[in-house]
Amino acid sequence: MALQTGDPAPDFTLVSKGPEGPELVTLSELTGKSNLVLLFFPMAFTGVCTQEFCDLTGGIAAYDALDAKVIGISGDNPFAQEAWAQKEGIGIQLLSDYEHTAAKAYGVAYEQFLPEANLIMGGVSKRSAFVIDKEGVVRHIDIQEHPKDLPDFDAVKSVLEGLS
């Protein structure tokens, strides 16, 4: 059954490249500290993903003001994510869903990424946004079918305003 607004957010433990090296990040350990915005994205080093995360980095104060932590999640390995973040000046925490377990739990894994280009890459994350409140409940879902389409960030902020 597909994840719906009002459902508990599926827990996960993923890898992030921290200053001391790779570290495990568990969603349930973040819950309760602030509202969360989980942004699944297809791949680091691609044009739309780079623009999305550079824009988010530049506008992160708006999310801070709404008591929200923004986290990016993709199937890239944490070292590639870190290289991308450093190259592009991305200041948002990135989590590696290398085995695509979180993408599958959230219902955002492509069965075949860009089939019109005959790319056989299952598990790649659909670009999507999930707002999770401090109690760990999903309050907003925005899943895009085409990788070039962005979530509605105004709607994300509106939901966050209602949680403040």
Image (spheres, rainbow, N blue to C red):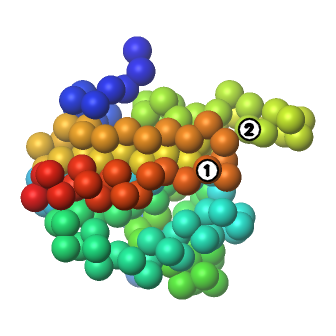
Q: Position of residue 125 (x, y in %)?
A: 58, 43
Residue furthest top in the image: 1
Identify the residue at horizontal 48%, vertical 30% (top origin).
107
Identify the residue at horizontal 41%, vertical 21% (top origin).
2
Q: Is label 2 in a helix, a strand or a loop?
A: loop
Q: Position of residue 139 (x, y in %)?
A: 24, 40
Q: How many marks?
A: 2
Q: Report which residue position mark 1 lands on.
A: 149
**Contact, CB < 8 Å: mark 2 with mark 1?**
no
Q: Report which residue position mark 2 lands on.
A: 113
Q: Is label 1 in a helix, a strand or a loop?
A: loop
Q: Position of residue 58 (x, y in %)?
A: 44, 81
Q: Is residue 127 left or right of residue 13?
A: right
Q: Amino acid at mark 2?
A: Phe
Q: Is residue 17 left or right of residue 131?
A: right
Identify the residue at horizontal 43%, vertical 31% (top origin).
105
Which quarter shows the N terminus? top left
Quadrant in the picture for residue 50: bottom right
**Vertical placement of 89 versus 27: above or below?**
below
Q: Amino acid at mark 1?
A: Asp
Q: Which mark is residue 111?
A: none
* Earlier residue among tags 2 and 1: 2
Quadrant in the picture for residue 141: top left
Callout 1: few (<14), some (14-19), or many (20+) C-alpha neighbours within 10 Å?
few
Identify the residue at horizontal 10%, vertical 58% (top origin).
164
Judging depth in this view, the residue of 156 and 112 nearest the camera is: 156
Quadrant in the picture for residue 122: top right
Q: Is residue 66 left or right of residue 76?
A: left
Q: Measure how far apart labels 2 and 1 are at the Cα level.
A: 14 Å
Callout 2: few (<14), some (14-19), or many (20+) C-alpha neighbours within 10 Å?
many
Residue furthest right in the image: 118
